[in-house]
Amino acid sequence: MKQTNYKIERILICLIVIGFIIISLAPSVLALGITPGRAVYDFSSGRQEDVKFKVINNEHKDMSVLIYVEGELNQSITLYEKIVEFKASESEKEFKYTFKLPGTLENPGIHQARIIAMEVPEKAESGTFVGATVAVATELYIKVPYPGKYLELKMDVSESDVNGTTKFVVAASNFGEQRIARAYAIIDILSKTNEKIASIKTETLEIDPQQRKDLVAEWKANVEAGSYIARATVIYDEQTGSIEKIFNVGTLRIDLIDVVVDDFRLGGIAKFTIVAENKWNSEIKDVYSRVFIYDAANKTIADSKSASIDFPALSKTTMFAFWDTAGVDEGDYDGKIAIYYSGKTLEKEIRAKVRAEELNVEIVGLTARVVGSKGSGSSSNFWLIALVITLILINASWFLYFKNKVKSKKSKQGS
Amino acid sequence: MRKQNKKQEKRRKNKNNRLIFIILSVLFFLVLLLLIINMPLYPYYGLHTRDSEIKFMWVGQNEKALVDETIDFKNPIEVKKNQLIELEPGTYYWKTSKIGTINKFTIDSEVSIIREGDNIKNTGNTKLFIEFFKNMGLTGHAVLDVDESVEQKNATKVIASQFDEQKNKTQEEKNETN
């Protein structure tokens, strides 16, 4: 009995030791957040503002967070808390800092400071801090206007399908001190090899200091599907600026053109010649296909993969897959051909008509794939309409009721 | 006496009936008005959120609303009723119809990271600029998209801040000239 107790005791000690080792070896999780990531203000002499921010305890744990300031404007910032204690139950805490700007800031552009929240690493027995830590920063940007006229540019492209309308938006922000009387953009559309395909011009707008205006132009994308370059040159009064962006027309796509099996004899090996077309204007690497054949019970009786190929731009290429038909009976078999490329899959259902001396493959059609749609209908409208109809009916009945009452009253008075 | 009581009761009843009639009529016209003017419900004016997925909701017959970064709606995107749209942090304006009210809301950027051993992941809603320190000295940096991770061995401190495309471009241009 004593021996058994002793054994149990030893096992328990071993388990505790193992548990302790596992815990000490497990990587510690450090997590911290801050919001907003940036606050932007325009410069004005002596400007003073309070700015709120939140520190987020993403891991919901007990921790100490040190808050400090660094950067060019650190002397202009007053922090109200330096060390903050978080409890596991607290998901976030709100703080504020105050900035007071000096009379002048020498250079135009952005002047900044960072308010950093850092998880305080655990203290060792000796009293020194040990281990790694993480920190997150919320930034303060003070924008000092440029002398004269100065445009900052950003370009967005709403992509379209082939023959669709592609929309180019050049967001022009005037960070200069002076008003821009005339600003417009000329957008050149170039191929990947820098050949000019088209050139379009936006409308002309005026832009006040600290104001953003969108210069918009549309282009009918009557080109092959693929990647293109939009190069915008913005002319504002007597100055120019430029920006460029790569955009797509259509989507990267491979089409299945045909599937042929030649020189077939039942019991032998069927060679599937899969003809596909690259509709994209660049080469697509590592393309391969798989042929699946199912029996009457929908069980896979063949799953053959072709070799991987690099598919040249805008061209047709063949891939080969093989099926050993030993033990296969004559008849019609359902199946599927899948082409894998750039993380996408094209699937088409097929029907293989197996005969003694021939194998015909028919492409049945595209296999349906559900594309997630987050939008949904108008149930609220239905209820509103129902409510309106009900109210109309109630009002109508009240109206009739009162009318009848007045009528009966009148008839009573008459009699 | 009885007759008087009956008359009073009748009058009271008539008064009540009239009141109900007025309330129902007002309610009817209110609902009719809502259907015509398309009242925006969410995101409401002045909303600040960190959730970059926004579900647009309104009452009315219109099936689409317009969302834009500028109040002049020169480059709007169209959203359907109850559609969930993913937007980048920033301030947006939206309206349900040409004559409808314009609502303004802000998606606040969130700089959040999680560090498990040497793995650092961006768990916020904006692209991050990450600096790695070892013994108080800067040893390198990385740019992380939302949900993207990076491995960095033996960094004693990691500081994450919101990525600034313009600043990064200027820095790259400076490096090229140097």
Image: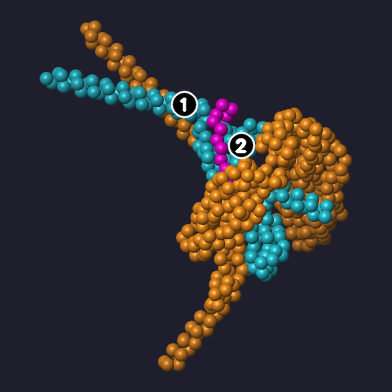
Chain colours: A orange, B cyan
Residue at image coords 57%, 57%: A33
As for residue A126 lying within the magenta part, the answer is no
Q: Nearer the viewer, residue A337 or A47?
A: A47
| Stretch in magenta | B97-112
Find residue A414 and report its horizontal and vertical position in percent: 24, 6
Compared to residue A358, the image places residue B54 above or below, namely above
Left or right, residue A23 beside residue A308: left
Q: Residue furthest front?
A: A103
Q: Nearer the viewer, residue A409 or B121?
A: B121
Residue at image coords 27%, 10%: A410
Left or right, residue A222 beside residue A40: right
Left or right, residue A397 beside residue A414: right
The label number, if any, that marks residue B67 in the structure image: 2
Find residue A159 and report its horizontal and vertical position in percent: 73, 40
Chain identifier of the residue bearing label 2 in the image:
B
Compared to residue A48, the image places residue A89 above or below, namely below
Question: Earlier along the polypeptide chain: callout 2 or callout 1?
Answer: 1
Q: Nearer the viewer, residue B82 or A215?
A: A215
Residue at image coords 78%, 36%: A234
As for residue B106 lying within the magenta part, the answer is yes
C-alpha span from label 2 to label 1: 25 Å
The residue labelled by disc 1 is B32
Find residue A223 and report its horizontal and vertical position in percent: 82, 37
Q: Residue furthest top?
A: A414
Screen quadrant of the N terminus of chain A: bottom left
- Residue A244 occupies which quadrant of the picture? top right
Find residue A354 and report its horizontal and vertical position in percent: 77, 53
Compared to residue B26, the image places residue A191 above or below, namely below
